[in-house]
Image (spheres, grey):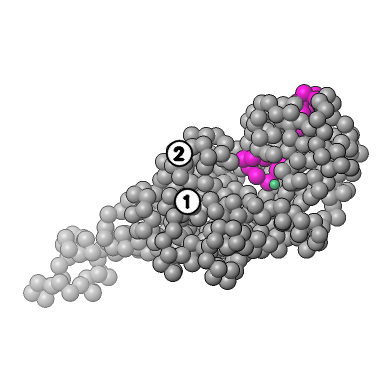
Amino acid sequence: MFLCKKLCNKCLLKINGNCLKGLFCRVLYSRHHSTRRLEEAYKLTKTKCQSKKLPRDVNPKAVFACNELDLKEVKVYGFDYDYTLACYKPSLEHLLYNLGRQTLIEQYKYPAEISKLEYKPNFAVRGLHYDIEKGVLLKLDSFLQIQFGTVYRGLTPLSNEEVLNLYKNRIIPIAYVEGHTKNAQLILQESQSKMVQLADLFSVPEMGLLCNVADYFEKNHIDYHPEILFRDIQSSIKNSHPVMHQIVGQNVHDYIESNDKTRPFFDKLVHAGKKLFLVTNSPYHFVNKVQARKPRFFTDVSRPIRVFDEQSGTHIWDRVTKLEKGVIYYEGTVKQMQELTGWRGHQVLYFGDHPYSDLADVTLEHGWRTGAIITELTHEIATLNDPEFKKNANWLQMLTQLIEDHQDCEDPEEQKILAKWMAERDRLRNDIKYVFNKQFGSVFRTYHNPTYFSRRLFRFADIYTSNLTNLLNYSVNHTFYPRRGVMPHEYISYFV
Ligand SMILES: [Mg+2]
């Protein structure tokens, strides 16, 4: 006969004053036993987590490798200009926003009241998608899943239920997101895609203006078409670039971070016999070098390269048969440049901040090696290095494992404990998201998955870092080796 003294002492179910020591007690005992088993497992895991040494800080100035890259093989270094060589201060976002807002009112006749809508600097992050049909800004992961809590209409987040009502599913079909073209820049013009990804840093103030104006329309019950709003704002910001170039040109120190390491970096490369070139969309008078009209520079098969005469400020019609040091060239294609210089794929390392228009074509079509300059890494790594974040991230990982190991119990009492664990896990996941950006979380992760943006970054960039001059910390013969990550089917070990 089964006997549980502890339970029998408390047991209220008695017949003729005698405690039932049979089946009922056995059920009670086994429940008590199994819930205690879960509680003990939780305590043990928590103790283990607290005893674990926190990981070492990540160096915010490190260069990170997605693919092995031997700098000895690199003979030519190429650079994009905006946000690669020139790092803009946050004041530039305000300037672009204000110029775009002014254009919206003056040229597109938007209500004058929008002039009161001020830029909210930390509202959006790079890499989000805007749905031109449904008029929402949202964050997708690499599986095209929506991250709940990151879908905004104007400045208002949509509830999970509203998101599911809108999309009927958490996963978005690829044709809806990407259309049928491989080139992200052309998505809107040439495909059936309903989404556009805002993948460069100039698009951050654009998103800010979009959300502010949409919010104004929503709150004032003004009917609007999200696609028209998107296109008007995109044109307004784009049309503001010449004025922006003028203003920045006159007040360089107000808008561009001065970096006293840029010159030593170039000197080091030149001293090592490397060739350097700059390819940019910004005009000559602005960057004092080259204009190329990317991404067509990287994708067009036929478009003549032209010489720009600095003195007269005009293009010369002569055929270009060789590239000369100090001469300024407009347009052309990467194919022509390779033919004129004799440079070949793996000898060229090109740096840009835009994973698609700067890096995708040169690596996919021409086999160039690529480096991405991602300024957000400074803030992301500072957040990763916060001890509180490390503790939360560690505990989240261990709690998730605990849930996975115990989830199959069917007893209602055990299920209650599991529900408590799940609620704690949800809270932790939100805390971890919130510290990067209140609305959209990290640029690189949606909870545990990589974001749509980072998956493509890791595909198109051989290396990435927060600032170009971080390369000064490495020799010109350095080899960057990627970390051997653990695949889901591989064993867990500290040595992989
Ligand atoms: Mg750029």
User: Which residue in the protein does label 1 denote?
Assistant: 227
Q: Is residue 126 above or below residue 295?
A: below
Q: Residue furthest bottom?
A: 17
From the viewer's side, name the closer residue of 306 and 56.
Answer: 306
Mark 1 surroundings within 10 Å by alpha-carbon count, few (fewer than 14), some (14 through 19), many (20 or more)? some
Quarter of the image with the C terminus in it: top right
User: Which residue in the protein does label 2 denote?
Assistant: 192
Q: Is residue 354 magenta?
A: yes
Q: Residue at x 46, y 54 (%)?
A: 226
Ligand 1 neighbours mark 1 (CB distance < 8 Å)? no
Q: Residue furthest left?
A: 16
Quarter of the image with the N terminus in it: bottom left
Q: Residue at x 83, y 24 (%)?
A: 321
Segment tinted magenta in the rendering: 337-358
Count the numbered circles shown.
2
From the viewer's side, name the closer residue of 90 and 351.
Answer: 90
